[in-house]
Image: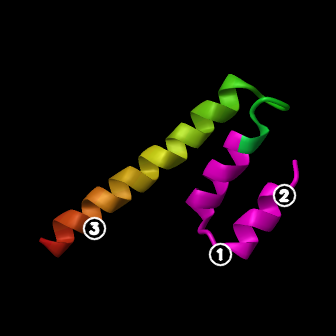
Amino acid sequence: MAIEPLDFIEANELGFAQGNVIKYVCRYPYKNGLADLVKARDYIDYLIKKEKLNETLES
């Protein structure tokens, strides 16, 4: 890759869940295939739940 995922994650000061989405999506074709995409989706689902909770609390 032109930019290592870790360098991108750190340069953009992403949180743990966001960083893992980037990591798993970038590596899936080379490492664990579908399993990495499922892990990325799990972290995306976590972020969605967190955002929905924040919206509820702000209402």
Residue type at numbered disc 1: Glu
| Foreground label between 1 and 3 | 1
Residue at the disc numbered 2: 3
Dots 1, 3 in contact, CB < 8 A: no
Q: Quadrant of residue 7?
A: bottom right
Q: Disc 3 on helix, strand or loop?
A: helix
Residue type at numbered disc 2: Ile
Residue lying at 18% horizontally and 64% vertically, measured from the top left = 56
Residue lying at 74% horizontally and 33% vertically, measured from the top left = 28
Q: Position of residue 24 (x, y in %)?
A: 70, 43
Q: Disc 1 on helix, strand or loop?
A: loop
Residue at the disc numbered 3: 54
Dots 3, 2 in contact, CB < 8 A: no
Give the numbered dot on residue 13.
1
Residue lying at 67% horizontally and 28% vertically, measured from the top left = 35
Residue 16 higher or lower than 1, as above or below:
below
| Foreground label between 1 and 2 | 2
Quick check: 42 left or right of 56? right
Residue 16 higher or lower than 47, as above or below:
below
Q: Earlier in the sequence, mark 3 or mark 2?
A: 2
| Foreground label between 3 and 2 | 2
Dots 1, 2 in contact, CB < 8 A: no
* Farthest top residue in view: 34
How far apart are labels 1 and 3 at the CA level? 21 Å
Magenta span: 1-25
